[in-house]
């Protein structure tokens, strides 16, 4: 199975910071990379698919980039509501899907 | 409005069985692949099983093969996960999810606790 590794975790930041979270795949997955946000006690919420396409309704301060094995999620100016855990997921092997271990933004 | 509502979780002893259900509304259920994803307490997300729109293709993660069975009832907009021979390590919140360029919709989850 394709392994997904996220860094860093946890990530300490402040409101207004530019934040970057990295996700690395164990083999090339093209652009088959998805990012989710999860807040405590809630289900995950899809933010970005195909590595860089913003889901409808997601604020423009979120962006994704990368291809092959290395991907990033960037929040341009951190807002209070962005403190959450972020997961990447590969959809290249369709399925089995695999997730990164998560990055808690605190 | 898209809604996915899981039910059927609870406390069960090791070796026991449970059947999870997910009732969906707000989209054409029969057009979409569906998944179960779980999250152990304080841990990350783990994909468990997928079923294609017509039930033709079914997949499981290795740790549940032979113990879990995914199924769906397109006429009644229901997704199921039959779980047997449950283990302590199956303890988790189980989410049903709709697959569309990613797991675009999630239920609120149902907690399965396997403990003696």
Image: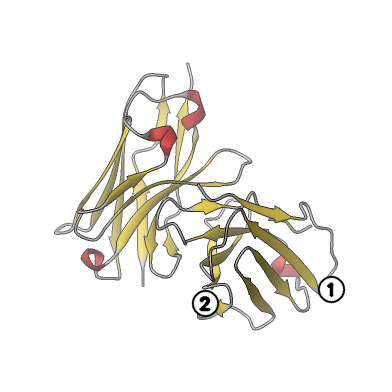
Query: Where does residue A67 sit, x and y in percent of width and height?
Result: 61, 71
Query: Where does residue A50 sit, x and y in percent of width and height?
Result: 52, 73
**Residue closest to the eye, A31 or A41:** A31
How many numbered markers are drawn?
Answer: 2
What label sits on residue A17 in the rendered view?
Answer: 1
Q: Vertical placement of B5 versus A48: above or below?
A: above
In the picture, measured across the screen, residue A21 lies left or right of residue B100, that is right
Tell me the SS state at disc 1: loop
* Residue shown at the point (53%, 69%) measured from the top left: A30
Outermost residue on the top side: it is B116
What label sits on residue B37 in the rendered view?
Answer: none
- Label 2 environment density (alpha carbons within 10 Å; few <14, some 14–19, many ≥20): some
Counting residues from the N terminus, which is met first, the one under dot 2 or under dot 1?
1
- Which chain is mark 2 on? A
Report how far apart the C-alphas of labels 2 and 1 lie in the structure.
22 Å
In the picture, measured across the screen, residue B25 lies left or right of residue A3, that is left
For mark 2, what is the residue?
A: A55
Outermost residue on the left side: it is B75
- Which chain is mark 1 on? A
* Residue shown at the point (42%, 36%) measured from the top left: B62
Query: Which image quadrant is residue B34 in?
Result: bottom left
Query: Which image quadrant is residue B84 in?
Result: top left
Query: Where does residue A2 sit, x and y in percent of width and height?
Result: 53, 51
* Residue shown at the point (65%, 83%) measured from the top left: A60
Tell me the SS state at disc 2: loop
**Residue closest to the eye, B104 or B55:** B55
């Amino acid at each position: 199975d394709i392994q997904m590794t996220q860094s860093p975790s946890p990530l300490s930041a402040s409101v207004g910071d530019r934040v970057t979270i990295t996700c690395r795949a164990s083999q090339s997955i093209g652009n088959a990379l998805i990012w989710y946000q999860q807040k405590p006690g809630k289900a995950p919420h899809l933010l970005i698919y195909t590595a860089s396409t913003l889901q409808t309704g997601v604020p423009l301060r979120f962006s994704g980039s990368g291809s092959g094995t290395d991907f990033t999620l960037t929040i341009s100016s951190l807002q209070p509501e962005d403190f959450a855990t972020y997961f990447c997921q590969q959809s290249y092997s369709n399925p089995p899907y695999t997730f990164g271990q998560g990055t808690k933004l605190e | 409005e898209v809604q996915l509502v899981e039910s059927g979780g609870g406390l069960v002893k090791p070796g026991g069985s449970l059947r999870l259900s997910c009732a969906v509304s707000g989209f054409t259920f029969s057009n979409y692949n569906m998944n179960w994803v779980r999250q152990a307490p304080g841990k990350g997300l783990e994909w468990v099983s997928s079923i294609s729109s017509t039930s033709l293709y079914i997949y499981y993660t290795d740790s549940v093969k032979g113990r879990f069975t995914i199924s769906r009832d397109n006429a009644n907009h229901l997704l199921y996960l039959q779980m047997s021979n449950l283990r302590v390590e199956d303890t988790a919140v189980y989410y049903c999810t709709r697959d569309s360029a990613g797991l675009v919709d999630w239920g609120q989850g149902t907690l399965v606790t396997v403990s003696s």
